[in-house]
């Protein structure tokens, strides 16, 4: 059964023995983050965590909920994540479309996947605007951080002219009871909407949610192709409509089952200094100007739980969320380009900086053409390093990848550099013969192995 909201997900995890409750008092400044970091690095059985007594706050804090393949599968209501990948591949093919964007739009356009709007959404049950952002036990995670951050925020915006909705996961620094700094990545849907509103000289309405359906938490961090909304894709993945509630101060809508809803506006030209922020690279992102969100309303569910994640050097919870992104977006890439046999994005590259790609021998494209296809995809557009390998290459084995890469043809012929991006071609050169034993000899050795008096064959 797929959990519909955060609290249901926590119950499912606890029943499965995947959750630990921390009942003693803990400090949200550095201490909670240090505990989460230790758990993500393998201590405390790597459990999901529920801090019931956060110093200075009423709300309990949940963390590392998605920190294992098992828990991520529970969030999606499946026994194994590969089930979703195979279903997605089958359903895309069944649309009959030849273009992947048309296929995806057709798939999620079905009536049974469209969001349904409800009155009296649970997420608006309690009005805590009087206390505002001071209600939230947001963490200061690292000593050099510029302040407290929301790290699992789902940021909802819409385009002022087209009305197109977007849900993204962006950095949010709290700077007061009714002020926050919102940093949308360049090229993101949120950044596009902000530019459009401010070009009209108008403030952009923003709604930030925490919690809600676990699938939406994952989707907020996924770059979906243009024209496909997160709510409709969530409906497809869930097999039923996402329940939404209309915001009180704007035209925006948010998942009705969210734990916390923050509403506000970003005025043109109003900025503050955001950061520094310790991130997945193991270094601090320097402080820089970011738009100011003027908070107008804060509402919560009854008995709300505050969810967060810790951003820092791997392994961290985001590895598992990113692996889900890799698994579900790969079929989109393969739909138009079946010569892509497989793909692996090492966790050390934080999943968006490098990829190993298995390419069919008869691909028929030049290195420049392959590079263009990969860098234009939603999955790999930000990758700094692409390594092309033969279709039989074990992509997850770093020793094999390095062996093939370092022993490829004449350097620098196999590589292409485009600005800060590099492609290395480690495929077997045309006409080269692989060194392998004869099949009949290998079979003979296996059959006679006991006669040799050696240890058991692995």
Image (tube, rainbow, N blue to C red):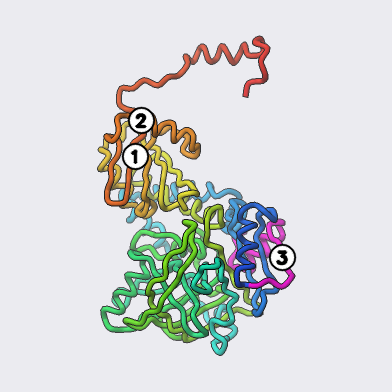
Q: Quadrant of residue 426?
A: top left
Apparent side of residue 266 relative to residue 373 in the rendered image (left or right): right
Point out the image quarter for the N terminus: bottom right
The reply to whether residue 120 is visible in this rendering is no
Of badges 1 and 3, nearer the viewer stands: 1
State the separation of the CA atoms marked 1 and 3. Answer: 47 Å
Instruction: Tell me the tag on residue 408.
Output: 2
Helix, strand or loop at mark 3: strand
Apparent side of residue 372 relative to residue 113 in the rendered image (left or right): left
User: Mark 1 highlights which residue?
Assistant: 424
Query: Which residue is pictured at 52% across the width and 81% down the height?
Result: 119
Q: Nearer the viewer, residue 200 or 454?
A: 454
Apparent side of residue 425 relative to residue 311 in the rendered image (left or right): left
> From which residue to which does the magenta span run?
1-27
Label 3: how many residues lie within 10 Å, few (<14), some (14-19) or many (20+)? some
Q: x%, y% of residue 380?
A: 37, 51
Q: Are marks 2 and 1 in contact (CB under 8 Å)?
A: yes
Position of 364 relative to 175 (above/below): above
Query: Which residue is pictured at 48% across the width and 61% down the height?
Result: 279
Helix, strand or loop at mark 2: loop
Q: Nearer the viewer, residue 279 or 99?
A: 279
Label 2: how many residues lie within 10 Å, few (<14), some (14-19) or many (20+)? some
User: Mark 3 highlights which residue?
Assistant: 21
Q: Is residue 394 magenta?
A: no
State the separation of the CA atoms marked 3 and 2. Answer: 52 Å
Point out the image quarter for the C terminus: top right
Mark 2 or mark 3, which is nearer the start of the sequence?
A: 3
């Amino acid at each position: 059964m797929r959990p519909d909201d955060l609290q249901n997900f926590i119950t499912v995890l606890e029943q499965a023995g995947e959750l630990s409750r921390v009942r003693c008092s803990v400090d949200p400044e550095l201490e909670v983050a240090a505990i989460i970091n230790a758990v993500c690095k393998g201590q405390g059985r790597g459990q999901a965590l529920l801090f019931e007594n956060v110093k200075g706050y009423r709300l309990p804090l949940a963390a590392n909920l998605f920190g294992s393949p098992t828990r991520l599968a529970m969030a999606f209501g499946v026994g194994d994540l590969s089930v979703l990948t195979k279903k997605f591949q089958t359903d895309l093919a069944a649309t009959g479309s030849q273009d992947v964007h048309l296929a995806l739009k057709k798939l999620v356009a079905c009536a049974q996947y469209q969001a349904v709007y409800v009155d009296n959404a649970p997420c608006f049950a309690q009005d805590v605007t009087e206390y505002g952002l001071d209600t939230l036990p947001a963490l200061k995670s690292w000593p050099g951080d510029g302040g407290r951050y929301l790290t699992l925020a789902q940021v909802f915006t819409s385009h002022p002219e087209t009305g197109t909705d977007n849900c993204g996961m962006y950095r949010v620094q709290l700077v007061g009871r009714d002020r926050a700094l919102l940093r949308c990545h360049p090229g993101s849907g949120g950044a596009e909407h902000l530019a459009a509103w401010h070009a009209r000289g108008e403030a952009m309405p923003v709604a930030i949610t925490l919690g809600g359906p676990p699938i939406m938490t994952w989707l907020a961090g996924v770059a979906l192709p243009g024209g496909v909304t997160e709510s409709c894709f969530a409906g497809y993945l869930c097999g039923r409509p996402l329940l939404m509630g209309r915001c009180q101060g704007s035209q925006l809508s948010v998942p009705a089952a969210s734990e916390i809803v923050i509403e506000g506006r970003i005025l043109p030209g109003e900025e503050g200094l955001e950061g520094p922020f310790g991130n997945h690279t193991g270094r601090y992102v320097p402080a820089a100007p970011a738009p100011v969100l003027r908070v107008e309303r804060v509402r919560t569910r009854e008995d709300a739980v505050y969810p967060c994640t810790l951003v820092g050097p791997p392994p961290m919870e985001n590895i598992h969320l990113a692996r889900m992104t890799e698994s579900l977006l790969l079929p989109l890439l393969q739909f138009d380009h079946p010569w892509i046999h497989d793909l692996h994005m090492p966790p050390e590259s934080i999943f968006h900086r490098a990829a190993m790609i298995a390419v069919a021998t008869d691909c028929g494209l030049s290195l420049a053409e392959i590079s263009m296809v990969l860098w234009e995809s939603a999955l790999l557009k930000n990758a700094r390093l692409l390594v092309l390998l033969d279709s039989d290459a074990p992509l997850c084995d770093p020793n094999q990848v390095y062996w093939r890469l370092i022993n490829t043809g004449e350097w620098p012929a196999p590589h292409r550099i485009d600005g800060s991006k590099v492609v290395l071609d480690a495929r077997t050169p045309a006409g080269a013969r692989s060194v392998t034993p004869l099949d009949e000899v290998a079979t003979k050795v296996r059959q006679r192995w006991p006669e040799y008096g050696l240890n058991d064959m692995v």
